[in-house]
Amino acid sequence: MISVDAALEQLFDLVTSMRAETVPLCEAAGRVMVRHATALRDQPPFSASAMDGYAVRAEDANPGTTLTVIGEAAAGHRFKGALQPSETVRIFTGAPIPEGTSRIIIQEDVTRTGDQITLGT
């Protein structure tokens, strides 16, 4: 009986390495990568909300606070504008976080009446 290392050495002596080549992604199916793939940028290329809710400024993120909804940010679509005190933006999963906001309050933690929300306790 031989050792595992000796068996592997004998096995690898029976094969030859294939040369590496660069091919377009659409032709890469069924091939093996020779090197690790490295992303050249973050995806998405912006800070995005991980949940549906309301984007608020840090100083407005207090339980019981009532805020006015002034717009919305859908997935991949930035809210254009700046929030003033006591304002919020409805935000959906995947949407860019509006400038000047630092918190997302999940929709389950607010009560909405018309264009007003009240943060839960």
Image (cartoon, rainbow, N blue to C red):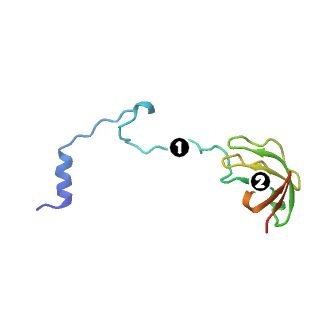
State the image quarter where residue 117 is shown.
Answer: bottom right
Q: CA distance from mark 1 to mark 2?
A: 29 Å
Amino acid carrying mark 1 in the image = Ala
Q: Residues within 10 Å of mark 2 (few under 14, many from 20)?
A: many
Q: Which mark is residue 55?
A: 2
Identify the residue at the far bottom of this view.
121
Residue 120, x across and y down, in percent: 79, 65
> Is residue 24 visible in this depiction of the protein?
no
Q: Where's the N terminus, which quadrant?
A: bottom left
Q: Where's the C terminus, which quadrant?
A: bottom right
Residue at 59%, 44% in the rendered image = 43
Which tag, 1 or 2, sits closer to the chain's start?
A: 1
Residue at 84%, 66% in the rendered image = 64
Q: Is residue 108 left or right of residue 68?
A: left
> Is residue 77 visible in this depiction of the protein?
yes
Amino acid carrying mark 2 in the image = Ala
Residue 73, x across and y down, in percent: 75, 45
Residue at 45%, 33% in the rendered image = 25
